[in-house]
Amino acid sequence: MPVVQAFLNLSTAFGLSASAGLNAYIPLLVIALTDRLSDGLIDLQGPWAWLSSWWTIGVMAVLLVVEILADKIPAVDTVNDVVQTVVRPAAGAILFAATTRTIQLHPVVAAICGVIIAGGVHAVKAGGRPVVTATTGGTANPIVSTIEDIISTVVSIISVVAPYLVLAVLVILASLLIWWIVRRRSRRSA
């Protein structure tokens, strides 16, 4: 397998896992429907083939509706975030492992990567939501939640259709992080 294809598969896995940190069911539905309806964009094989069964797609669609509604209501969204503390990292693990199968990444390593990425995004989201609720009296919760759902959908679709864009964003973010670290260290030494 060419190195470029391996990086694109990793980009897809990173993008989908990050999306799962915002909403577990959107990226799962994106890959399930893409596998079911497209010709080769995503090919869920072996232990991941169940994701694209119509029963699984139906259950995920119902869970997505429940999560979208629960995430729009102050206080209920906090309870939902507690429940999703397990679900979102698990979805990230599934997504990372399912989309890196073709590059022979060990499934345990892939699952750990997915848990870390989705869990990190979820931690930021869950940590910020009580602040939004407290500062706006809950009036901004539906707006913030809708923006999160849109971001999760767009990133999931881009991760599947144009993973090179995810790769470009990852390179830019890594460059900015390195620049920030170097700048902080130079300020400390000065």
Image (cartoon, rainbow, N blue to C red):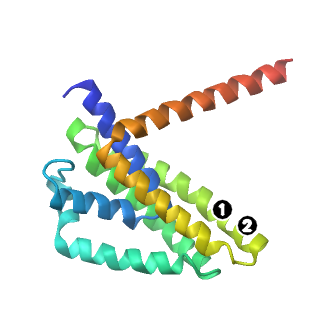
Q: Marks 2 and 1: in contact by CB < 8 Å?
A: yes
Quadrant for residue 175, please give it.
top right
Q: Nearer the viewer, residue 104 or 137?
A: 137
- Which quarter of the figure is the N terminus placed in? top left
> Residue, x 33% and y 62% (percent of image)?
28
Q: Nearer the viewer, residue 132 or 78?
A: 132
- For label 2, the residue is 131
Q: Is residue 105 above or below residue 144?
A: above
Rendered-image quadrant of the C terminus: top right
- Residue 98 in the image: state x and y as whole percent: 27, 51
Label drawn at residue 143: none
For the point 43% across and 80% down, the residue is 66
At 69% from the left and 77% from the top, the residue drawn is 139
The vertical placement of 80 against 112, above or below, is: below
Give residue 114's position: percent from left, percent from top.
Answer: 41, 50
Query: At x 25% / y 32%, what residue is drawn?
Result: 5
Q: Quick one: label 2, few (<14), some, or many (20+) residues within 10 Å?
A: few
- How many other residues sit within 10 Å of disc 1, few (<14), some (14-19) or many (≥20)? few
In the figure, is residue 70 to the left or right of 159? Answer: right
Element at label 1: helix
The residue that label 1 is drawn on is 127
Q: Quadrant of residue 73?
A: bottom right
**Residue 144, position in %: x, y?**
60, 67
